[in-house]
Image (cartoon, grey):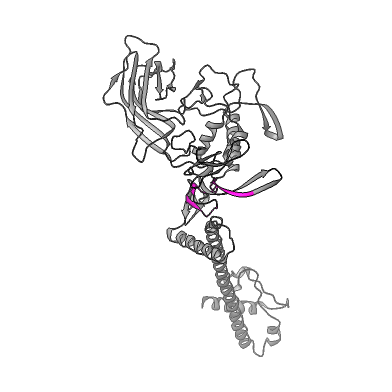
């Protein structure tokens, strides 16, 4: 009884299946199961949201219930509920109708907040036996804020023990006589655990008035003398809308009447009401219903050879951004639909990004205040400007700006560290390169003193070459002498080697 509606799929052998795209850029004609039906439902819902972006999940459920088609769906349990809708345990309210949903969604007035009314039905435990029937009247929380005037779905929360729960069938009957099967018997369920605070849901009484007597039936479909069961808890939870919902079938909805009509056309249809009344649904009402406001409407009346262009007082629909209003403009709102909030007289839509990343209270307040001030200035200048709801988006760019600045800071820090490392490496390299020439110079100066008058010519042509590591750190056998003359004697070579070792030890 929790099934709301149906989409196409396939389940029985030999039935036609869904044709759709497939892997490797191919098509398939054997798409089946929930893999086919769930995307179809999602696509239809997306079309409705495209027609009206302010729809909530509850609005969408109402659209589904009101537009689904029960025809051509074969089932043996189709019934008519308390408000005249056909419903089935197999198909819910019928097959989804994309076209009807889009048409209804375009001018749909958003629902008010959802109400939850809880009634404790059972005061003491009851034996199940072969069949238990329990009835109790409820007031649907009348006179309290959680009062439910129009039902959406109902839950029966049960704690029930039984030696074989698969034998049990559970039914719930609404005050208007709609019978919902909460649980069918299951022959292969041999569990003796029962149900501990289980919530069974039904959508078959949608839009019914929940006030009155509700009946719970628990039946053992395969009774045995040794079977036993006890119902120890029964809580009825009503979910729905309060009395402020625009429902044409509700007694609170104003009934147009011709008693206050001032002018009729040739077909005897009221086209103008008496002073103090407004034209609504070809009749006259004292007060316009929620979602409408009284205002002038142009009347195009053709009389023989001339046309009378005049205005009459009529109930005009509020702007789509408003729930209730004092005028037809986007800045004439008195209250707002869900996911919007009222700022002065405008409803600002709270988009998905703002819900996930709300601004700080101080920052958001300053933004709204500045926009409201700017709007007042625009009206005083006589130039119409777009409503502030269209200028709320910039704060959502703040996380992007912060991310960009953070990346720039990280890159700058990385570049700075790299530059410092390069600078220190360069200083060390310069120090190493400038240290060795001093040794060379000392060597040259010393050798010049030792060779004075004896080997001056040869000293000019003699030099020490370093290949890889400095010569002062190398082994004597691995030293390389770059003398340009091959006739140097062994004594001079030993003298130079001894001097280099002396300098190295110093």
Question: Residue 334 magenta-drawn?
Answer: yes
Q: Position of residue 61 (x, y in %)?
A: 51, 35
Between 371 and 20, the one lying in front of the other is 371
In the depicted structure, whether residue 141 falls above or below residue 93: below
Task: Locate residue 106 relative to residue 113 in the image: left or right.
Answer: right
Can you name the residue that lies furthest to the top here?
A: 225
In this view, the residue in front, 457 or 125, is 125
Number of numbered discs on residues:
0
> Is 455 rendered above or below residue 315?
below
Give coordinates of residue 227: x percent, y percent: 33, 13
- Which of the 4 quarters of the picture holds residue 200? top left
Answer yes or no: is residue 124 visible.
Answer: yes
Quick check: is 495 in the magenta stretch? no
Outermost residue toward the left? 124
Query: Residue pushed farthest front?
Result: 304
Instruction: Please determine whether, in this image, residue 328 is positioned above or below residue 101.
Output: below
Q: Looking at the image, can residue 162 be seen?
A: no
Nearest the viewer among 12 and 190 is 12
**Residue 6 placement: quadrant:** top right
Region in magenta = 309-336
Measured as percent of width and height from the top left, residue 81 is found at 47, 24
Q: Where is residue 240 in the image (x, y as percent from the top left)?
A: 43, 35
User: Is 438 placed left or right of 343 in the picture?
Assistant: right
Out of 35 and 353, give the one closest to the viewer: 353
């Amino acid at each position: 009884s929790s099934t709301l509606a149906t989409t196409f799929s396939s389940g029985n052998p030999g039935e036609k299946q869904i044709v759709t795209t497939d892997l490797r850029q191919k098509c398939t004609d054997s798409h089946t199961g929930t893999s086919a039906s769930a995307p179809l439902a999602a696509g239809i819902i997306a079309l409705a949201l495209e027609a009206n972006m302010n729809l909530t999940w509850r609005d969408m459920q109402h659209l589904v219930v009101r537009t689904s088609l029960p025809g051509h769906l074969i089932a043996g349990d189709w019934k008519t509920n308390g408000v005249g809708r056909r419903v089935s345990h197999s198909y819910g309210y019928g097959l989804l109708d994309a076209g009807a949903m889009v048409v209804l969604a375009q001018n749909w007035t958003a629902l008010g907040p959802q109400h939850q009314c809880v009634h404790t039905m059972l005061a003491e435990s009851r034996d199940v036996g072969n069949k238990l029937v329990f009835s109790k009247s409820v007031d649907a929380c009348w006179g309290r804020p959680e009062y439910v005037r129009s039902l959406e779905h109902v839950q029966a929360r049960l704690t029930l023990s039984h030696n074989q729960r698969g034998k049990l069938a559970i039914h719930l009957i609404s005050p208007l006589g709609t019978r919902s099967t909460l649980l069918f018997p299951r022959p292969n369920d041999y569990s003796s655990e029962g149900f501990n605070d289980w919530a069974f849901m039904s959508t078959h009484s949608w839009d019914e008035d929940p006030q009155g007597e509700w009946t719970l039936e628990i039946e053992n479909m395969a009774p045995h003398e040794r079977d036993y069961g006890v119902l120890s808890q029964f809580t009825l939870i009503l979910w729905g809308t309060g009395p402020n919902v625009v429902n044409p079938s509700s007694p609170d909805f104003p009934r147009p009447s011709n008693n206050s009509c001032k002018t009729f056309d040739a077909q005897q249809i009221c086209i103008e009401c008496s002073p103090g009344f407004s034209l609504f649904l070809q009749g006259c009402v004292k007060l316009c219903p929620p979602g409408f406001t009284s205002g002038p409407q142009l009347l195009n009346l053709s009389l023989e050879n001339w046309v009378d262009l005049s205005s009459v007082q009529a109930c005009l629909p509020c702007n789509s951004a408003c729930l209730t209003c004092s005028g037809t403009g986007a800045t004439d709102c008195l209250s707002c639909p869900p996911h919007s909030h009222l700022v002065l007289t405008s409803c600002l839509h709270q988009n998905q990004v703002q819900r996930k990343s709300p601004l700080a209270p101080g920052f958001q307040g300053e933004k709204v205040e500045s926009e409201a001030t700017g709007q007042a200035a625009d009206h005083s200048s006589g130039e119409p400007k777009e409503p502030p709801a269209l200028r709320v988006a910039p704060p959502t760019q703040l996380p992007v700006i912060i991310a960009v600045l953070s990346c720039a800071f990280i890159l700058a820090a990385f570049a700075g560290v790299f530059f410092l490392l390069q600078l220190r490496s360069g200083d060390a390299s310069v120090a190493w390169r400038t240290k060795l020439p001093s040794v060379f110079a000392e060597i040259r100066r010393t050798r010049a003193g030792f060779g004075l008058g004896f080997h001056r010519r040869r000293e000019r042509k003699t030099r020490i070459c370093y290949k890889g590591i400095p010569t002062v750190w190398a082994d004597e056998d691995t030293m390389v002498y770059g003398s340009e003359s091959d006739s140097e004697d062994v004594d001079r070579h030993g003298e130079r080697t001894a001097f280099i070792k002396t300098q190295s030890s110093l």
